[in-house]
C-alpha cells in the first residue's frame, strides 16, 4: 500500500447564486434582507486519495468544479462538508506574481512574495540566487517590477512560487507562461519534483499535458467525481464522453 | 490556540507587508516621507488659527510644566487622534484592497488589517518625535515620561487594530462602512477634547445639570468616549509632564483589550469565507 499524500474525503462545496445581493446598507434595509439566493453545489461528495510521489491530474470540462476543488486544496476556500487532509507542506500556484507591488524592485518583491507564500527571511536569502537565476531577470532585479515585461513579471512570480519547496504542490494552468525556453525549464523543474518523491496536483484543460505528465488522474463532471485512477484510463474515459 | 500560533508564525509576512506599504507609499514623490508630516502640520495651522486666534480657546497652562502654547497643546491630542483615524480607515479597507491576494494565496488574513495599522503607526512615530522636539524647544521637560508615552502608543495601536479588524469584516459585507466611517470619524473628533479643553464641556454640563430630571449629566455621556481617555493621557504626559490619572489609563487599557478580543473573535469567525465574499 502506498502512502497517501492528500486525502480528500466527502468534500462538498456550496456557493450561493445571488438573484439579488445587497452590498449596501440602504438596499439591505429597504428590502429587509441581505440577499436572495439559491444554493449551488460546486462539489458534491468528492472523495479520492492522492498517493505520495504521484503527479495527479484533475480534468473535466468548464464548470465541473476543478478550480473549486483546487482552491479547497489550497485552503483558500473551505468545504461545507467533508475534509481535506494533507501530509506535509502544501503550496499552491493559482496565480503567479499576486501580491507584487509595482513600485518596488524585483529584489524587494521576491522577499515580499516569498513571505506571503510562507517562507522565512533566511530561507529566501538562501534561495535568492536560484530564484533570480531561474527567472532570468538578473539584469533588472533592482528595477521596479512595473517596468517589467509581462513575461518577466510572470517568470519572476513563478520562480518565487516554485522555490517554496513544498511536499505537495498544487498547480493551476500556470504552466503555459513564458516562452518555450522557460516552459522547458518549468517542465524540468516538475520532473525534478517528481524525482524527489514529491506530490504534484495539476489542473489542466490540455489532455496532452495530463497524459504526458500525470500518472494518476481524477475526472470531475458537474461537481461529481466520475472516475479516479490511472491517468490514461481516466483520460480515455473522459475522451469517450465527449 | 492554533489560530494564535499561526498568526504569530506570520510575523515576517507582517513586517514585509508593512515595509511594502511604507516603501511604496511615497515612491515617485520629490519630498518623500516629508509628506507624512505636512498633513498634521497643516491641520495644526488651521486649528490654531480658528480655535486659538479667532475663537480664543484657552486651555489651562501645563501643570507642572508651565507650557502655554496652543499649537503644542493641540498636537498632543491631535497626533494620537489622526493616527487612530488613519489606522482605522486604512485597516478597514485593507481586505477589499487586497482582494486579489486573498482569492489567490493562502495566508493568515489577519495580517492585512494589522499591517495597515502598523504602517500608519510608522508615520505616527515620526510625527511624535517631531512633537517631542517641539515640546523640548518650548521648554517642556518630557524625558522621564517618554517610556510611558511609548507604552500608551502601543495601547492605542492595539485599540485601533481591534476596531480596524471589526470594520474590515463589516466592510466586506457592506461597502457602506467606509463612507459611514469617514462621517463618524469627523463627528467623533469633535466629540473628543482635541481642539478645545474638556473644562469647557464640564462647565456647560455643570450649568445644565442632570438631563431630563435624571442625575446623568452631559459630561457623563461625554466621557463614555474611549478616545477622550487616550487624549487625556497623552496630553498629561507630554504637555503637563506628569503622571496621568490612573482611571484614564485603566479605561484605555480596558477599551484596547475589549477591542482586540472582539476584533480577533469576529475576524477569526469570518476569515474562512473571505475569499468567497470578496
Image (cartoon, rainbow, N blue to C red):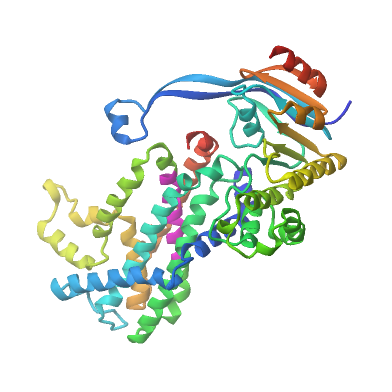
Q: Is residue B273 left or right of residue A159?
A: left
The tally of labels here is: 0
| Image quarter of residue B207 | bottom left
Image location of residue A85, percent across then percent down: 71, 32
Q: Is residue B166 magenta?
A: yes
Image location of residue A6, percent across then percent down: 75, 31
Image point (69%, 64%), residue name: A139
Image point (71%, 20%), residue name: A219
Residue B163 makes an appearance in the image: yes
Residue B256 makes an appearance in the image: no
Q: Is residue B179 left or right of residue A229?
A: left
Image point (44%, 68%), residue name: B29
Up/down of A42 relative to B190, above or below = above
Which stretch did the figure color magenta? B153-168
Up/down of A90 relative to A130, above or below = above
Image location of residue B9, percent across then percent down: 64, 52
Of residues A15 and B5, the one nearer the viewer is A15
Residue that lies at the very extreme toward the front in this rendered image? A180
Image location of residue B102, percent across then percent down: 55, 42
Magenta: main secondary structure: helix
Q: Is residue A129 magenta?
A: no
Amino acid at each position: 500500500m502506498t502512502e497517501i499524500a492528500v486525502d480528500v474525503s466527502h468534500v462538498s462545496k456550496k456557493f450561493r447564486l445571488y438573484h439579488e445581493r445587497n452590498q449596501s446598507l440602504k438596499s439591505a434595509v429597504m428590502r429587509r434582507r441581505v440577499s436572495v439566493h439559491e444554493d449551488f453545489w460546486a462539489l458534491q461528495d468528492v472523495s479520492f486519495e492522492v498517493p505520495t510521489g504521484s503527479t495527479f491530474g484533475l480534468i473535466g470540462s468548464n464548470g465541473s468544479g476543478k478550480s473549486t476543488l483546487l482552491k479547497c486544496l489550497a485552503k483558500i476556500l473551505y468545504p461545507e462538508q467533508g475534509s481535506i487532509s494533507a501530509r506535509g507542506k502544501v503550496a499552491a500556484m493559482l496565480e503567479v506574481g499576486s501580491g507584487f507591488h509595482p513600485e518596488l524592485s524585483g529584489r524587494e518583491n521576491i522577499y515580499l512574495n516569498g513571505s506571503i507564500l510562507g517562507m522565512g527571511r533566511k530561507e529566501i536569502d538562501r534561495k535568492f540566487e536560484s530564484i533570480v537565476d531561474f527567472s532570468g531577470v538578473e539584469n533588472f532585479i533592482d528595477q521596479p517590477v512595473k517596468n517589467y515585461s509581462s513575461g518577466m513579471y510572470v517568470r519572476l512570480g513563478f520562480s518565487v512560487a516554485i522555490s517554496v519547496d513544498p511536499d505537495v504542490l498544487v498547480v493551476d494552468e500556470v504552466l503555459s507562461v513564458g516562452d518555450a525556453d522557460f516552459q522547458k525549464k518549468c517542465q524540468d523543474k516538475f520532473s525534478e519534483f517528481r524525482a524527489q518523491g514529491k506530490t504534484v496536483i495539476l489542473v489542466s484543460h490540455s489532455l496532452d499535458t495530463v497524459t504526458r505528465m500525470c500518472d494518476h488522474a481524477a475526472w470531475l463532471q458537474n461537481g461529481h467525481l466520475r472516475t479516479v485512477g490511472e491517468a490514461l484510463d481516466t483520460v480515455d474515459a473522459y475522451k469517450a464522453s465527449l | 490556540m492554533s489560530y494564535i500560533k499561526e498568526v504569530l508564525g506570520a510575523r515576517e509576512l507582517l513586517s514585509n507587508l508593512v515595509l511594502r506599504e511604507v516603501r511604496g507609499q511615497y515612491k515617485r514623490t520629490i519630498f518623500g516621507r516629508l509628506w507624512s508630516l505636512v498633513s498634521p502640520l497643516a491641520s495644526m495651522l488651521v486649528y490654531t488659527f480658528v480655535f486659538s486666534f479667532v475663537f480664543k480657546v484657552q486651555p489651562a497652562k501645563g501643570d507642572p510644566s508651565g507650557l502655554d502654547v496652543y499649537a503644542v497643546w493641540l498636537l498632543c491630542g491631535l497626533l494620537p487622534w489622526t493616527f487612530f483615524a488613519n489606522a482605522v480607515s486604512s485597516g478597514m479597507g485593507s481586505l477589499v484592497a487586497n482582494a486579489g491576494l486573498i482569492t489567490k494565496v493562502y495566508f493568515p488574513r489577519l495580517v492585512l488589517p494589522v499591517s495597515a495599522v502598523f504602517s500608519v503607526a510608522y508615520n505616527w512615530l515620526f510625527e511624535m518625535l517631531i512633537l517631542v522636539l517641539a515640546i523640548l524647544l518650548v521648554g517642556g521637560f518630557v524625558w522621564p515620561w517618554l517610556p510611558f508615552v511609548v507604552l500608551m502608543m502601543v495601547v492605542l495601536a492595539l485599540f485601533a487594530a481591534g476596531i480596524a479588524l471589526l470594520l474590515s469584516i463589516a466592510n466586506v459585507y457592506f461597502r457602506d462602512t467606509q463612507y459611514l466611517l469617514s462621517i463618524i470619524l469627523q463627528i467623533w473628533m469633535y466629540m473628543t477634547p482635541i481642539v478645545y479643553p474638556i473644562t469647557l464641556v464640564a462647565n456647560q454640563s455643570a450649568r445644565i445639570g442632570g438631563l431630563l430630571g435624571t442625575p446623568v449629566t452631559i459630561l457623563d455621556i461625554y466621557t463614555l468616549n474611549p478616545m477622550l481617555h487616550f487624549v487625556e493621557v497623552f496630553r498629561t504626559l507630554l504637555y503637563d509632564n506628569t503622571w496621568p490619572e490612573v482611571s484614564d489609563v485603566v479605561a484605555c487599557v480596558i477599551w484596547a483589550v475589549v477591542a482586540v478580543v472582539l476584533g480577533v473573535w469576529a475576524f477569526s469567525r469570518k476569515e474562512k469565507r473571505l475569499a468567497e465574499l470578496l
